[in-house]
Amino acid sequence: MSHAAQVQQPGPRQKINAQAIAPPPARRYRAALFQTYVIVAAVAFVTLAVVAHTVAYFPIDLSVTRTVQAYHGIWFARVMFWVSWIGFMPQVYVVVFGLAISLFVFGLRWEALCLLAASCGALLGGLVKLVVYRPRPSADLIHVFAQLPSSGFPSGHTLEFTCLGGFLAFIAYTLLKPSVLRVVILSSLGALVLLMGLSRIYQGQHWFSDVCGAYLFGSLWLIGTIRLYRWGKPRFFVRQPVAPNPNQQAA
């Protein structure tokens, strides 16, 4: 075999990378699904926000809230209270900055900064609240645990933890090896995000459509945060103590 032929032969690293990468048709299909979701979610959120600006609540909002509040289990009520409690200030700041500092100290510095970026979705959600200015559920329709002064759409608690929990789940899924620990972390984060939305309905402080709007907007912000993370990963903190640029560590 000639020297030129030997040079052209793929080495072990190239073979592994070729096996790990999906073929072009699969990549195009996945990209199309991703882009379709972004478009559909964006259109759905804008539509829901416009309608919520003029409609105080939908019939399904009332039905869902009354169904959820019809259950009076003591442990369920306690879970709903504590899940909702951590989304209020100052607790939510302790959670956000505590997690970011923990990641930074552990060595995941770029991940820590992107986690703060993910949490900023709630700030933009606050501006959306001012524009939509939808009233919160009324005590003459359902049981309201505490009447809050701000507008209801979208749910700030749900939006914050969709962005925060979603990004933490992304980090855990991409950085941790398959293990029981990873399954526990992903399951716990997913449960927290879902329970947060349910707790806001149970306490009568948001309608079902407020929560849906938060999930939609939160997913879009999360996508943007992940794109920021992947763009900056090979550019910033490439020599960080833990999980440096994955391109430099490819097998």
Image: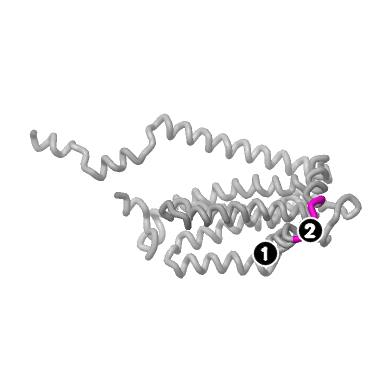
Q: Is residue 61 left or right of residue 87?
A: right
Q: Amino acid at mark 1?
A: Ile
- Which residue was labeled with disc 2? 150
Vertically, is 187 above or below 240? Answer: above
Mark 2 / mark 1, whichever is N-terminal: 1
Asked if the magenta segment contains residue 73, the reply would be yes
Q: Residues within 10 Å of mark 1 (few under 14, many from 20)?
A: some
Vertically, is 235 above or below 58? Answer: below
- Which residue was labeled with disc 1? 86
The magenta segment is: 70-74
Q: Is residue 192 left or right of residue 24?
A: right
Calculate the distance from the C-alpha at mark 2 to the C-alpha at mark 1: 18 Å
Q: Nearer the observer, disc 2 or disc 1?
A: 1
Label 2: state its secondary structure.
loop
Q: Residue at horizontal 46%, vertical 70%?
A: 105
Q: Is residue 5 left or right of residue 14?
A: left
Q: Is residue 14 visible?
A: yes
Between residues 128 and 185, which one lies in front from this camera angle?
185
Asked if the magenta segment contains residue 135, the reply would be no
Asked whether the residues under the numbered discs 2 and 1 touch, taking CB atoms below 8 Å apart as contact, a structural biologist would say: no
Across and down, in percent, residue 180 comes to 47, 55
